[in-house]
Amino acid sequence: MSPSPALALPPAQQQPPPDTASEALDQYEKLTAQAEQVNEDLLAAKTDLDKKKAALAQANADLAKARRTMTQAKADEEAFRGQVDTLTSASFQGARFNKLSALLTGSSAEDFLERAAALGVLASDNEEALEKLTGAVNLAADSEAKAADAQARAQKATTDAQVLTDKITKTKDKLDDQIEVVEEAYDNLSGEEQQQLAGSGTEDDSVYLGPSGAGGQAAEVAMAQRGKMYVYGAAGPDTFDCSGLTMYAYAAAGISLPHSSRAQYGYGKAVSQDDFQVGDLLFYGTSASTIHHVAMYIGDGTLVHASTSGVPVLTAEAPYGAGQDYLGARRIAG
């Protein structure tokens, strides 16, 4: 899946500090929403880059194998050519290899049969050698061509992904500069105003025990992270972003997920909203290519997620407590 284009944002110095607390809160929410989108773009690009590097490594391995096969084929060619040359020379220079000559020079019918049989064996060996030679050479040439093509495609994809990663990283750097401007205002917000950032979510320290199975184990691990702060690109154990939390939780359950909510959307199977089970992942965005957030269902109409900068990992009502642009859910285990 190709990451969406990086956001084009004005320089940080063109974003003056807000005059009031309400303006600061509004500006902060807008900038963090943009930051989350760019962060997801970056993570998706890095995930894609890792895949391209793996494809390149495989292509190089295929190419090396093809070259070894070609080297062996050339050695076989020389050996088979010597055998063919010997048989050909004998056929022309020694009439005993001719069936008619075998009959004329033989002293008996049995002699003829023995000579003819020998000739048939030699011809069969020669034909088999030629077939093996042709097959080996064709196979090696075909393998090398395919591996070289795969290598070229993988290299181009890797270069493209790296260029995209660099572009998104630069955009995120610009966005981080802007966020620094409003973080000063955030520090001046009252406790009540800072609590508004959590929306309908709640931060609690009650004990949560998940049901049996990987989904329940992942949910239990995710719930154990409540109170830890959101940090862009973080995947634990002390701070998390949204996909970092779900990746961390499922890793504890023995299931590997990529560090990207968009990439995680490609795992498991789709489930409807009336069929949520503990451990299901809930995704947010207008489409699969614009997914920017992921949360985890923990049962009883509740989810847990790392929501946004300035807010700790907490629970909220499922699914809209984590965003009105709820897109769909995936069952990773079970």
Image (tube, grey):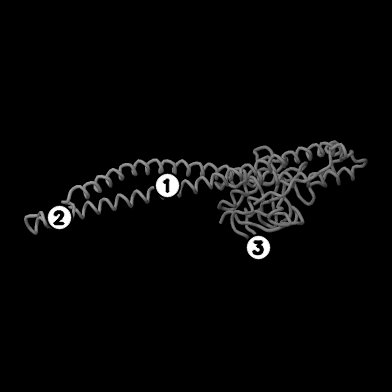
Quadrant of image for the C terminus: bottom right
- Could you tell me the amino acid type at mark 3? Ser
**Residue position marked by numbered label 3 in the rendering:** 272
**Crowd band around label 2 with a 10 angstrom C-alpha radius: few (<14), some (14–19), many (20+):** some
271 to the left or right of 11: left
User: Which secondary structure lies at badge 1?
Assistant: helix
Q: Please tell me which of labels 2 and 3 falls first in the chain.
A: 2
Residue 265 image point, x, y percent: 64, 53
Foreground residue among 207 and 125: 125
Residue depicted at 84% across the width and 38% down the height: 12
Residue 55 image point, x, y percent: 55, 45
**Residue position marked by numbered label 1 in the rendering:** 140
Give how far apart the Cα atoms at labels 2 and 3 are: 85 Å
- Could you tell me the amino acid type at mark 1? Ala
Give how far apart the Cα atoms at labels 2 and 1 are: 41 Å
**Crowd band around label 1 with a 10 angstrom C-alpha radius: few (<14), some (14–19), many (20+):** many
Residue 185 image point, x, y percent: 86, 38
The answer to whether the residues at label 2 and label 3 have Cβ atoms under 8 Å apart is no
